[in-house]
Amino acid sequence: MKNKDKKNSSGLTLVEVLLSIIILSIGVSTLMLATNRCLTVIKRAQNRDIAQNLIRQINTDHPIVKIDLDEKIENGDFEKFENFFWEREILFADLENTPGLFLINLTISWLEKGKNSSETISYYIYAPEAESVSRKIN
């Protein structure tokens, strides 16, 4: 009798093995989903970092000359970053009360998983000496 009890109590049953495999597979699939989400967030952060650096590059490669300021839209792309594009919009901020105050909207756009994403920075430049200001006032 002792041999019969020993035989039944040692080892795992098929149900226990299947249950442990199911629990393990759920845990692994959850980790894989979390890793995929983490990689997506990292890629998005890298693209935003690239966009911030490209904004600085635009202001160095295509500086704004105060005397030539006028309402216009400029745009272009980048040699090293094929999916990134830029657009700079220059507007009169308040011609009646503050002639010479310009609003600059600089936008970097890129494709991210088939969707358009962008980073925009807006700032003001005061240039009362701009030729366009004297034309508008007179």
Image (cartoon, rainbow, N blue to C red):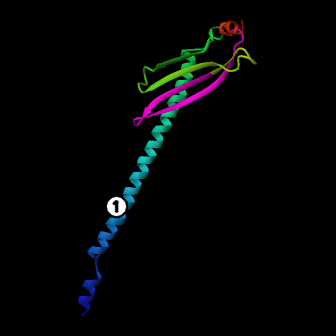
Q: Secondary structure at mark 1?
A: helix
Magenta span main SS: strand
- Residue bearing mark 1: 25
Quadrant the N terminus occupies: bottom left
Q: Residue 54's x, y, as percent?
A: 52, 24
Q: Residue at x 48, y 38 (%)?
A: 44
Report the residue that reaches farthest toward the bottom.
Answer: 1
Is 118 contained in the magenta span?
A: yes
Q: Nearer the viewer, residue 90 or 24?
A: 90
Up/down of 24 relative to 13, above or below: above
Up/down of 97 relative to 35, above or below: above
Q: Residue 23's x, y, as percent?
A: 36, 65
Q: Residue 64's x, y, as percent?
A: 61, 14
Is 36 contained in the magenta span?
A: no
Quarter holding residue 121: top right
Mark 1 neighbour density, 10 Å: few (under 14) some (14–19) many (20 or more): few
Q: Residue at x 55, y 15 (%)?
A: 62
Q: Is residue 14 left or right of residue 96?
A: left
Q: Residue 63's x, y, as percent?
A: 58, 14
Report the residue that reaches farthest toward the right.
Answer: 97
Q: Is residue 38 left or right of residue 63?
A: left
Q: Residue at x 33, y 70 (%)?
A: 19
Q: Residue at x 55, y 20 (%)?
A: 88
Q: Nearer the viewer, residue 25 or 106?
A: 106
Up/down of 31 relative to 91, above or below: below
- Kindly identify the amino acid type of the residue bearing the numbered disc 1: Ser
Q: Which residues are magenta?
A: 104-129
